[in-house]
Image (cartoon, rainbow, N blue to C red):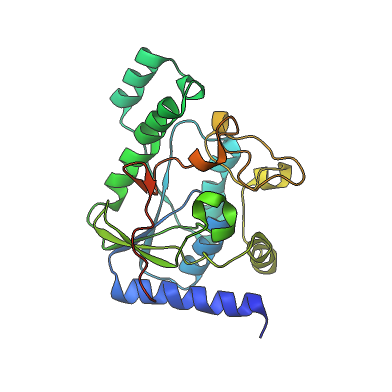
Amino acid sequence: MSDLTSLIDATEQTLTRIAAEFAPAVFASSLAAEDMVLTDMILKAKLPIGIFSLETGRLHQETLAVLDKVKARYDHDITLYRPQPEAVAAYVEQNGLNAFYNSVEMRRECCRIRKVEPLGRALAGNKAWVTGQRRAQSTTRAELHVQEDDPAHAMTKFNPLADWSEQDVWDYIRANDVPYNALHDQGYPSIGCEPCTRAVQPGEDVRAGRWWWENPDSKECGLHMVDGKLIRIKSVAA
């Protein structure tokens, strides 16, 4: 049994356990490569895990096109959560459309409005949520566990791909003909909002293109943070 086969088996077992023991559960998909692996597993196994994505209003067209690819391949519509229009309008009026370039505080406030607040609505009423985070993605995720407590949302959080490498992700995608974001073929290993994402250069960290003007230690949007700290408060044995 290859290492990838073992990872796939373990991940499928984790997803099956989530569906059986933590219902209702939802999967927060950024529509990136990792998330397409989990989307493929969830939908092919017909697991009762809802799939949603945060449509921030600043996504690349290539990212939005993934929604149609999922519909065509799996006949499934990913649920979209959008920011409150009045909150976006107030931020832009007070600070300018691209104020997130000015400071970490301004950037995180934009992320709060466009991503964190909608996430709260998406998670409401669920017992657990699933992400496509991997430990190897960045220094801010080095302590990632497959299963964690999430006190901010009063639920359990799962990162089934925590142990996967980028090569594992792409080997799975190619072996299973999984649809993916076209930007990945253009030097974008990690994809967020269009104005906050650039292609990476050879040898750069996979998340170097995210908020590239910031220190690597600040490169989180807030979805996985509480009071400015990453939610790594307590791991739970699987």
Which residue: 46% across, 52% down? 29
**Percent x, y for residue 111?**
41, 34
Is 71 on the left-hand or right-hand side of 120?
Answer: right
**Percent x, y for residue 176?**
65, 68
**Percent x, y for residue 62?**
60, 40
Q: Residue furthest bottom?
A: 1
Of residues 2 and 103, the one nearer the viewer is 103
Is 40 on the left-hand or right-hand side of 95?
Answer: right
Of residues 32 and 232, the one nearer the viewer is 232
Whether residue 31 is visible = no
State how many labels appear: 0
Q: In which quarter of the image is residue 54?
A: top left
Whether residue 69 is visible = yes
**Percent x, y for residue 224?**
39, 49
In the rendered image, the vertical position of residue 209 relative to residue 32, given as above or below: above
Image quadrant holding the C terminus, namely bottom left
In the rendered image, the vertical position of residue 30 relative to residue 156, given as above or below: above
Q: Which residue lies furthest to the right in this view?
A: 202
Is 207 on the left-hand or right-hand side of 98?
Answer: right
Image quadrant holding the N terminus, namely bottom right
Of residues 55 and 199, the one nearer the viewer is 199
Of residues 80 and 9, the one nearer the viewer is 9
Which residue: 64% across, 75% down? 4
Which residue: 51% across, 48% down? 67
In the rendered image, the vertical position of residue 115 relative to residue 19, given as above or below: above
